[in-house]
Amino acid sequence: MNQKNAGKLVEEGGTGSVRDVEVLILGAGAAGLGAASTFLSQGFDQFLVIEGADHIGGRVHDVEFGGIRLEKGANWLQPIGGPMKKIAEKADLECQKVEAEVNQHKLMVMSENGEVIPEWEVEQVITEVCDIMVEAGDFAANSLNSELTMRDFMADRYCSDSSSDALRKAVEWYVFDFEYTVPPEQASLDVGHWDRVGSSGFVIDQRGFKIIFADVVARLVEKRRLLLNRKVISIDHSQIEKVCVTCADGTVFRADAVLLTFSLGVLQSGLVEFTPPLPHWKTTALNHTPMGAFTKIFLKFPRKFWDDSEWIMHVSDRRGYYPAFMNMEAQGLFPIGTNILIAFVVGAEAQRVENQPLDTTREEIVTVMRGLYGEQQVPSPTDIMLSGWLNDPLQMGAFSAPLPDGAPSKILHQLQTPVGRIFFGGEATDDKFAGFVIGGMRSGEREAKKIMRGVLKWEIKRKGFLGK
Ligand SMILES: Cc1cc2nc3c(=O)[nH]c(=O)nc-3n(C[C@H](O)[C@H](O)[C@H](O)COP(=O)(O)OP(=O)(O)OC[C@H]3O[C@@H](n4cnc5c(N)ncnc54)[C@H](O)[C@@H]3O)c2cc1C
């Protein structure tokens, strides 16, 4: 899959030209490629995929770091037992099954000064939090009360006051915030799909997670249906039967229908101008759904000084302050000598970290590590890299987070509803797996089917069978 050439292959007409096409897919991430795959499987190829980056995949994107390729975005096959596992098997994607189970020495939890918290104690708290989450899911499914937050529910169920309990806070972060990017007080009880949490594997394939899209990308390249490096700056839907899309290089595309798959972050930040502006109900739904912040920090050290467990957790009074590190040379991941840890921060901490100098982040992490392993044991990292989705103008965040309140089904319906001939896809619009790669793919398939029905109708109308 030569993605760079994919862009060149289809550069007909040069920049600044006007091109007519039946359907335009905006974005070559999971949703855009899911839509393209659906079109092709139904024998429809009168479409073009426009992508602003120089590569396909969107938030499925690998980079070289410290001698190996790591995933900057999606990394786990989620949800556990879901359709992603089959897709990965078909692509022969190399994955390592990782599950944080204390009794298998996969999770090591320490206090700030490096004191190891006994496994039985950690296990007890994990069980407590997970049981409450399961109960919350059942309660939400059978309750009409949409005012409750997850925190309200948890506070009611905890045996004692949780606010002073640092271990419980750390476990809560691991179980909840790490999954949803927000703490329980910022999520409505109806986060739903608690059963989706967990994964069927951690991707270590050196071809990248993106290999799952290889087949559809090859067909797009062959049919010259993919344009990379075309950043959309405006969408004009003032005409009834045509939508005009303008790119930063001046190229204009005129289409009968447009499928928009840009992230919520992009649409919320006004980076794409709509003429006329999108209706109030649509912007309200887009703005009401939070775009979560989830940051990976890759750290390469001159040597390994940490434990062999897959996860090293740091219990701190400051919630979410570098709470979890993943050991890239834990059993079954990368070879001994890789010397790489990945730190994770989410929500407000991710916002803070992504907006401060990288050297400050490096120092903060080294201080935390020295607290855990001792001043003399921890050398300075030789390299550091942030995933950096928050300030990327093609993303502006990581993935959609749960609604803070309100009626999720109404908001979802509004997110999915087209505006004239502009159709809306992307992970945030999926009813079951919002936030995940599979959610993006499903949304593309859903909208492609909707557009196919519209194209048929418009075609018949054009030929005069339906009249006006
Ligand atoms: C750090 C991180 C970790 C994650 N972990 C997991 C995980 O473990 N498992 C999992 O299943 N999911 C995970 N996700 C979520 C998953 O990656 C996304 O839900 C999914 O990839 C989104 O697909 P999408 O097609 O909806 O959006 P995108 O992948 O964002 O696709 C939209 C495309 O539109 C393009 N675009 C945006 N603006 C413009 C413009 N103006 N002009 C032209 N093109 C534009 C973008 O470049 C992008 O390619 C993670 C995401 C992140 C960021």
Image: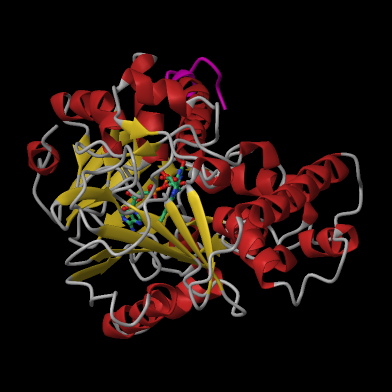
Q: Position of residue 446 (x, y in %)?
A: 53, 29
Q: Position of residue 271 (x, y in %)?
A: 39, 67
Is 463 covered by the magenta stretch?
Answer: yes
| Residue 336 showing in the rendered view | yes
In the image, residue 306 lies at what x, y percent? 34, 62
Of residue 7 and residue 89, the one placed in the foreground of this image is 89
Q: Which SS does the magenta portion mostly show? A: loop
In this picture, which residue range is highlighted in magenta? 459-468
Question: Please, is residue 454 above or below residue 233 in the view?
Answer: above
Total marks placed = 0
Compared with 113, 145 (above or below) is: above
In this rendering, would 443 be left or right of 271?
right
Q: At 29% across and 65% down in the image, what residue appears? A: 305
- Please tell me which residue lies in front, 307 or 400: 307
* Residue 177 is one of the magenta-drawn residues: no
Q: Quadrant of the N terminus?
A: top left
Q: Quadrant of residue 8?
A: top left
Name which residue lies at 21% across and 23% down. Answer: 219
Q: Is residue 407 visible?
A: no
Is residue 7 toward the left or the right of residue 113 in the image? left
How far from the left and from the top, in percent, is residue 36?
A: 35, 29
- From the viewer's perspective, is 81 left or right of 193? left
Give left or right: position of 214 versus 127. left
Residue drawn at x 35%, y 54% is 327
Q: Quadrant of the C terminus?
A: top right
